[in-house]
Amino acid sequence: MLGTMVTSNRDRAKVLGFLMHLLNGWLFASLYAAAFESWRKATW
């Protein structure tokens, strides 16, 4: 679904959708880690 926002080619949409999903996950994790680090609550 994410890839179809960029292209209508099904094969390319699968790859782009996967990459977009991966980047969104990394962005969310980075923001989450930065928030806990700034609140000094980052522990194991």
Image: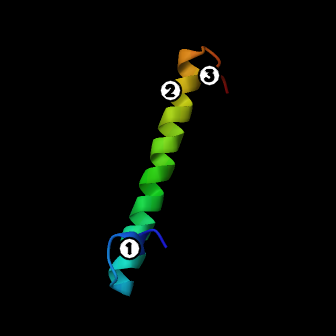
Residue at 49% over, 73% down: 1
Q: Which residue is mark 2?
A: 34
Q: Amino acid at mark 2?
A: Ala
- Residue 13, quarter of the rendered image: bottom left
Q: Measure how far apart labels 3 and 2 are at the Cα level.
A: 9 Å
Q: Which residue is mark 1?
A: 15
Neighbor class of circle 1 (other Cα within 10 Å; few <14, some 14-19, many 20+) is few
Secondary structure beneath dot 3 equals loop
Residue 2's x, y, as percent? 45, 68
Q: Measure how far apart labels 3 and 1 are at the Cα level.
A: 34 Å
Q: Which residue is mark 3?
A: 42
Mark in front: 3 vs 1: 1
Q: Measure how far apart labels 1 and 2 are at the Cα level.
A: 29 Å
- Of callouts 3 and 1, which one flags the residue occurring earlier in the amino acid sequence? 1
Q: Image height check: is 28 above or below 14?
A: above
Residue at 66% over, 22% down: 43
